[in-house]
Image (cartoon, rainbow, N blue to C red):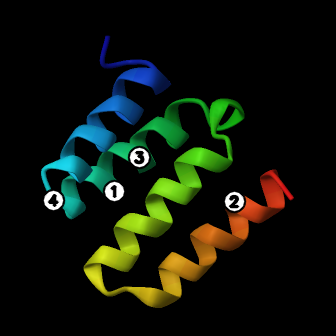
Amino acid sequence: DATNFEYWYKQGIGFSDLEKYDEALTCFEKAIELDPGKADSYIYYQMGNTYFDLGNYTKAIESYEKTIELDP
């Protein structure tokens, strides 16, 4: 169901596995937008990895910091 967090999160993981990083980020962001309360440290960790793979180290660090904030 394209209206829930899990759908978009799993799509993001799939795109990331295929090295389609821009698409992965779009999916992760959509998941968070749909249900910010379900966004845990792991989704931000995945976003950090994706930003890192794209060479956007500033955004990667921001995502990793959010990961630590949610799960010290």
Q: Position of residue 35 (x, y in %)?
A: 59, 30
The residues bearing labels 1 and 4 have C-alpha atoms spaced at a distance of 11 Å
The residue pinned by badge 2 equals 67
Residue under the point 45% across and 88% down: 57
Q: Element under label 2?
A: helix
Q: Which residue is mark 4?
A: 19
Measured Cα–Cα span from mark 4 to mark 3:
14 Å
- The amino acid on which the numbered mark 3 sits, given as a three-letter code, is Phe
Mark 4 or 3, which is nearer the eye?
Answer: 4
Q: Earlier in the sequence, mark 1 or mark 4?
A: 4
Q: Is residue 42 left or right of residue 22?
A: right
- Name which of mark 4 and mark 3 comes first in the sequence: 4
SS type, badge 1: helix
Labels 1 and 2: the sequence-earlier one = 1
**What residue did someone put label 3 on?**
28
The image quarter containing residue 54 is: bottom left
Q: Can you say whether 34 is above or below 21 in the image?
A: above
Which residue does the image show at 13% across and 50% down from the upper left? 18
Tag 3 or tag 2, which sits nearer the N-term?
3
Q: Which residue is mark 1?
A: 25
Pair 1/2: label in front: 2
Horizontal relation, residue 41 to residue 60: left or right: right
